[in-house]
Amino acid sequence: MGSQGVGQTRSAISQARRVVVKVGSSSLTTPEGGIDHDRIRDLADVLAARRAAGTEVVLVSSGAVAAGMAPLGLTRRPRDLATQQAAASIGQGLLLARYTAEFARHSLTAAQILLTADDLMRRAQYRNAQRAMSRLLEIGAVPIVNENDTVATHEIRFGDNDRLAALVAHLLRADVLVLLTDVDALYDGDPSLPTSSRISRVDSPEDLAGVDLGSTNRRGVGTGGMVTKVESARIATEAGVATVLTSAANARAALDGEEVGTFFVPAERRRPSSRQLWLAHATAGRGSVVLDPGAVRAVTVRKASLLPAGVVKVEGDFSAGDPVDLRAEDGTIVARGLVNYDASEIPELMGRSTRWLARELGSEYSREIVHRDDLVVL
Ligand SMILES: Nc1ncnc2c1ncn2[C@@H]1O[C@H](COP(=O)(O)OP(=O)(O)O)[C@@H](O)[C@H]1O
Ligand SMILES: N[C@@H](CCC(=O)OP(=O)(O)O)C(=O)O
């Protein structure tokens, strides 16, 4: 199976070689707001059985903030970043202790991996995370991934774990991504309304045009609701990873390839690089560079690097290495890329040929504004 994925049918999910399972806060907490120990036990049982059958399993688990609420005497999810981070650092340890105990009943070792969005952007960290997780899988451990909430700032934060799970599935060349939440499937409207019906299969994002993708449920312990789950499924399927969205109670059935939840059919084309995936799905760029029509064509049609000569304007305050939007003069975002200069340096370079820049300012100013390897057309 491997990098070929599971193809277009659910039944092959039961044969998958490597799966990533993501469980959201909403399924891990009791109505009173504490961690649901029974749920963690059931999930560990399902994943251990799958592991025993020879499938490599990675768990992406939310719940750190929720687990930290009770020790802090909080009854609602904190809104400010600092308290969320405090709750996460208290809760993450408690959460991992629970998983460690439950997997130990099956003689499996749980391993904690905390990642920030930044770790998936920077090549060295990305490779490191990839190596560590692959090694953990080789030695039979169960990697349990969460966002490193304590160091994630507003700007670089995933916030929800849905997109993180999709990027981890891609990073590990997984065959399947299972998104577990507190509803049994994606519905074509508010799932609490009798008029809404389950969507059982999504062949392409166009199938969801007109579907009301709502936010989190009323308890509001989760983050992102269906919007981020559908986005996650889109990232994963674009990378060739079959995706199932269902409730935590259906975890076993989903992994057996049964007709539960919503199945998002994977694309058959080549997998994009993680860096490209990240850039395409990163939150908005930290600023923009505006391109003349020739540069728009060069970047989007010829897939060329963006040179200083084609830039007409800079917007925002970014630093070299940041993701920026590449816009046409009418404001449309045509691409996103990692910029090689600070915003303040670009006005001096705009409209100049690389040869002129090298002669007048030195060879270090003749490099591209955005190199084509660091650029994704949107
Ligand atoms: N179209 C829809 N189909 C299904 N669920 C939806 C839809 N729109 C909004 N939701 C809500 O999304 C919630 C799950 O999102 P969230 O709370 O972020 O979960 P998690 O913590 O598992 O990530 C569900 O409880 C459901 O009420
Ligand atoms: N990293 C955070 C995840 C935040 C969150 O609520 O995510 P999710 O439930 O997946 O929408 C935590 O562990 O609390």
Image (spheres, grey):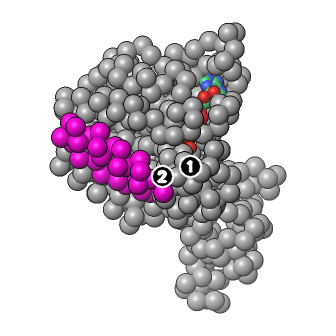
Q: Is residue 219 visible?
A: yes
Q: Amino acid at mark 1?
A: Met
Q: Nearer the viewer, residue 3 or 195?
A: 195
Q: Is residue 137 magenta?
A: no
The span shown in magenta is 90-115
Location of the N terminus (image quadrant): top left
Instruction: Decide: is 319 above or below 324.
Output: below
Q: Give the percent coordinates (x, y) of residue 159.
A: 58, 50
Q: Is residue 207 visible?
A: no
Instruction: Decide: is 152 above or below 110.
Output: below
Q: Quadrant of residue 354?
A: bottom right
Question: In the rendered image, which residue does mark 1 sit on?
Answer: 69
Q: Give the percent coordinates (x, y) of residue 311.
A: 72, 67
Question: In the rendered image, which residue does mark 2 sit on?
Answer: 91
Q: Nearer the viewer, residue 4 or 13?
A: 13
Q: Which residue is found at the position 48% from the left and 25% from the top?
A: 247
Specify which label sits upstream in the sequence, 1 or 2. Answer: 1
Q: Which residue is found at the position 67% from the left and 70% from the top?
A: 318
- Looking at the image, residue 259 sits to the left or right of residue 310; the answer is left
Extreme residue in the right direction = 330
Instruction: Decide: is 179 above or below 299.
Output: above
- Are the residues flagged by discs 1 and 2 in contact, CB closer than 8 Å? yes
Q: Nearer the viewer, residue 322 or 250?
A: 250
**Ligand 2 lies under 8 Å from the Cβ of mark 1:** no
Q: Secondary structure at mark 1?
A: helix
**Ligand 2 lies under 8 Å from the Cβ of mark 2:** yes
Q: Amino acid at mark 2?
A: Gly
Q: Quadrant of residue 31?
A: top right
Find ligand 2 in the image and state its quadrant.
Answer: top right
